[in-house]
Image (cartoon, rainbow, N blue to C red):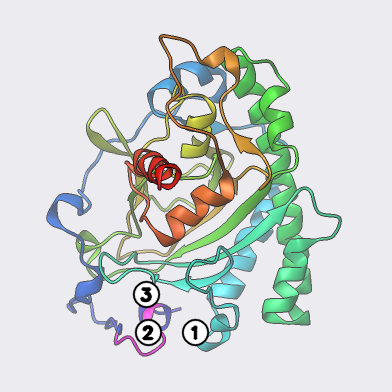
Amino acid sequence: MSTLDALNFHDNNIIPSNSPNSIIPPQFIWPDHEKPTLNLPDLHVPPIDLLNSVCRKHGFFIVVNHGVDAELIAKAHEYMELFFGMKVEEKQRAQRKVGEPCGYANSFVGRFSCKLPWKETLSFTYSADCNHDVVEDYFVNALGEDWRSVGKLYQQYCEAMSKVSLTIMELLGLSLGVGRHYFRDFFQRNESIMRLNYYPKCQNPEQTLGTGPHCDPTSLTILHQHDHVHGLQVFVDQQWHYIPPNPQAFVVNIGDTFTALSNGMYKSCLHRAVVNEEAVRKSLAFFLCPNEEKVVKPPGCLVDEKNPRILQDFKWPTFHHYTQKHYRADDKTLLAFSNWLYQQTTL
């Protein structure tokens, strides 16, 4: 798929040229202080057995020997090619509506007017609390009966990610001293989000970003990076670092919602995705989220005089709505949400 096919959609005059000497549209150009930097060092991301120390510092770690079928992962990437390789008008049958979590998005025009991300995504929800295959149903309803087998594959992938997530939650609970089952039980009936990320080649990669600097508002992100194309960068010790792709591993990071659950003890870290002019980059991202009825608040043992509450009680749909309708996620999302919550209760 060409860059033109990837980015020329609707009637927004976003028509990047395939010429290597062309200039990308101004909507995609980021401020100088946010533009990517070349020749960055790799970040040493420790394995999960160093969980406590790494989560207190930056919240990124890798999971190997995870038990997820390698063929399932390979098929998930293969089907990404199938979807994103279609013509734009065909992909738009699954067009994402502004403020909605599901659907196809191309550079998020309509939601943002500047600093547009150089990417395409397909997002859909997964429910561990549902008695039918919601992912499979989504693909059939959005794209037609021919996509049932694709939906079934991603249903299986989400089920595998949910299982891995719950195991990680056991370890997080043990590392925080709240027991193996506390967080596992909290997320047992999770209602999560799956996202397929596709970053086309870019003729001026130093001018734009695939995904801008942000902390994930969700609870936990499980990312699988395809092939050996670099792109994920994490801001640690006042410097951006690459996390190199490892096809045998998942990259996991703490999100803002779990930061709230841990009363600020475990950190969600600023990260971004850069693009390049040599190769397309693809990734699979599973965002663990609580059931909509769950109240997000830390266990009592994590709150005392030295560690007062950092945030009042909330439910995930309220936070998600805030990031979709009121605030573009960055490194201050949780603080901004806290202030917004306070304003809502004092009106």
Q: Earlier in the sequence, mark 3 or mark 1?
A: 1
Mark 2 falls on what kind of element? loop
Q: Closest to the observer: 271 or 214?
A: 214
**In the image, residue 10 lies in the stretch drawn in magenta:** yes
Type of the residue with mark 3: Val
Whichever of labels 2 and 1 marks the residue nearer the N terminus, that label is 2
| Residue type at tag 2 | Asn
Quarter of image, res 206? bottom left
In three-dimensional space, the C-alpha distance between marks 2 and 1, rounded to whole angstroms, equals 8 Å
Return the residue nearer the eye: 15 or 41: 15
Q: In percent of the image, x 51 and y 38: which residue is there?
A: 257
For residue 191, side relative to residue 264 (left or right):
right
* Residue at the front extreme of this rendering: 347
Magenta highlight range:
7-13
Callout 2–callout 1 Cβ contact below 8 Å = yes
The reply to whether residue 204 is visible in this rendering is yes
Disc number placed over residue 8 in the picture, else none = 2
Residue 294 on image: x %, y %: 66, 39
**Which residue position is annotated with label 3?**
109
The x and y percentages for residue 163 are: 73, 39
Q: Residue furthest right?
A: 131
**Label of residue 88 in the image:** 1
Q: Relative to 43, is 190 above or below?
A: below
Q: How many marks?
A: 3
| Within-10-Å neighbours for mark 1: few <14, some 14–19, many 20+ | some
